[in-house]
Amino acid sequence: MDKTSKQWSLGWLLAGLLGWSPATMAQDGVTVADVSRQAFSQPLPGLDAADRERFARGRGLFRQVWVVSPSLDGEVDGLGPLYNRPACGSCHPLNGRGQAPDGPRQRLRSMLVRLSLPGENDHGGPLPHPDYGDQLNDAGIPGVPPEGRAAIAWEELPFRFPDGESLMLRRPRLALEELAYGPLDGVLTSLRIGPPVFGLGLLEAVQEETLLEMAARPVVDGIQGRVNRVWSTETGDWRVGRFGLKANVASLREQTASAMAGDLGITSRLYPDKTCTPVQDACRQAAEGGQPELDDTQLDDLVFYQAHLAVPARRQRDDPQVQRGEAQFLALGCAACHRPQLRTGDRATYPLLRNRTIHPYTDLLLHDMGEGLADGRPDHRANGREWRTPPLWGISLVESISLPGHFLHDGRARNFTEAILWHAGEALAARERFVALPAESRQALLAFLKSL
């Protein structure tokens, strides 16, 4: 048996162990055949008239540019006093992935910088900086100075495959400048790019028991995912995290409310207080847009909208190169973390999301990704080298929706190859197998990713 045949055999063996086969990848009622710039903005099939109206209300709020209080339109005022961007869509353009800046003079656009000090808060999460909180807000309403400015410079690193193909990798170097409230000595930082928001309701509908079962499986090929246990502001207890780049938020509702508070400065019942720290006098004295600024109905509509965003359907399944790449994906061990198939449970909040077979290419678990991707900033049980496996569904359409494609947590990877080459830690063996492939096999793997 030649090398290619062995890889095919191993690939389908792993597929069987994962409970997956091409036959299970048929249309499942949660995907849409859309490859336009609106591919990430379509509702799940099956919404009735009332739900479509609710979806539209949530879409309007997601796209809304919020304004400073007081305003004639009290429904959408309350921006700031400190914030990063004025709309959800600013960091998630067309519900897709954000972008990293080209250089230090360019604003972060659709990125942010997490801040904390060594240690933990009362619930085991990151310890906020006393003067800046847990996030650098680089914008302020009139009369309120921004906290500072984040500048990113890119360091380039050459890489050469054994067959001679070469490319340049890059990694960000962060500098915090124009700080308004004193130095940030000893602070821990983490650059975060805005992730896509489609399919989130389906990921939330995967039961906690499923995540715990996957985390309890034996170590295979050095890979052992684990759950992040986080304190839920919504329920007041410890839960399994699944949202956020370190799985540090348990529910979509809480993720939405925390983003509205941290990124836009919009209060809600879950986060009723402005993010102003004691030294930020102008921030604390600024006008408010009501209590809370985002009422429960608006929050419900925002969550409903994100929960019911459909997933783009896979394409080119019958292409021989794509099929070879699919086998490579399995044989290299990529599917150990990027699991092709999960099942939603029967306890999902929204009936349309229950008992669905989905193909997100994630296990929603934390994995050690090595020192190269480490941010050194713990978040609940996630250490400074761990990240949640990001879903791969829809990844091929990123460049057609939000050019150019920026991948990984900080947008350093400009294409799929660069993203793979940054894998280390638990993913090191899979990465080294990829590097050892002949060029045509690497291209086949990339063709498979471009079919997702």
Image (cartoon, rainbow, N blue to C red):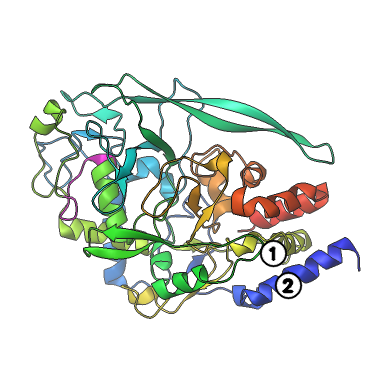
Say whether residue 269 is magenta. Answer: yes
Q: Is residue 450 left or right of residue 97?
A: right
Residue 21 visible in image: no
Question: Pointers 2 and 1 in contact (CB under 8 A)?
Answer: yes
Measure how far apart labels 2 and 1 are at the Cα level: 7 Å
The three-letter amino acid code for the residue at tag 1 is Leu
Q: Give the secondary structure at mark 1.
A: helix
Q: Is residue 10 left or right of residue 427?
A: right
Q: Is residue 380 left or right of residue 72?
A: right
Along the viewing direction, whichever of 33 and 424 lies nearer the viewer: 424
Question: Which residue shows up at 56% across the image and 49% down it?
Answer: 369
Which image quarter: residue 371? Answer: top right
Quarter of the image for the N terminus: give it.
Answer: bottom right
Numbered tag placed on residue 148 in the rendering: none
Q: Which residue is mark 1?
A: 330
Q: Which residue is mark 2?
A: 12
Q: Is residue 270 above or below residue 359?
A: above
The number of callouts visible is 2
Residue 446 visible in image: yes
- Pinpoint residue 267: horizontal percent, then vertical percent: 17, 47
In the image, the segment drawn in magenta is 263-271
Question: Which residue shows up at 43% across the image and 50% down it?
Answer: 245
